[in-house]
Amino acid sequence: MAEHELHKRLGFRVSRLAQIMQSRLEGQLASLGLTRLSWCVLTGIADAQITAPSDLASYIGITRPTMSRLLRGLEARGLVLREAGQGDGRAVALALTEAGRDVHAAARRIVDAEGAHFAAKLTPAQHAAFMQAISLLDDGETQTLTGF
């Protein structure tokens, strides 16, 4: 099959790869009842120690309403707690429950395995160059997303 102009376009190639990676990861995380974004929320709380919902939304790059929806779902499942934060009475601090920590640990194994699957296709130098290229392409792009 001849390669067409479409297949040479950066946007097409990056979008296609992103969809492939997203589909694979979502399929695996579904076994834990998680989505890619809910995994990002758990990781932001557990690993980056981000406890304010608005800071967590900024960290992930999603809108505040999307963050609120994700937190409601994780809270309903008993994975995340909203506690009174410091400062005024409106402040909220997020924390993982014991169940949330367990699910996060299981999800991390899945995410690591998926990352290793794709990283194994590249040499260390190719991986470093690819990550650098992604950083260059992403630099200065400040859009927040509703469900990336």
Image (tube, rainbow, N blue to C red):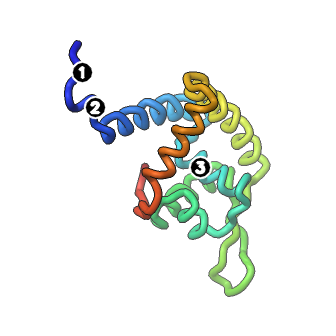
For the residues bearing labels 3 and 2, Cβ distance under 8 angstroms: no
Q: Reply above or below: 17 against 134.
A: above
Residue drawn at x 73%, y 53% as measured from the top left: 46
Number of the front mark, 1 or 3? 1
Numbered label attached to residue 8 = 2
Q: Secondary structure at mark 2?
A: helix
Q: Tell whether 44 sits left or right of 133.
A: right
The residue that mark 1 highlights is 3
Residue 10 located left or right of residue 5: right
Quarter in which the N terminus is drawn: top left
Crowdedness of circle 2 by 10 Å Cα count: few (<14), some, many (20+)? few
Position in image of residue 122 (x %, y %):
56, 26
Which residue in the protein does label 3 denote? 40
Q: Residues within 10 Å of mark 1 (few under 14, many from 20)?
A: few
Q: Choose between 109 and 18: the one closer to the eye.
A: 18
- Kindly identify which numbered label has been placed on residue 100: none
Asked if marks 1 and 2 touch (Cβ < 8 Å), the reply is yes
| Secondary structure found at label 3 | helix
**Please, what is the three-letter code of the amino acid marked with disc 1?**
Glu
Q: Quadrant of residue 10?
A: top left
Q: Residue at x 63, y 35 (%)?
A: 111
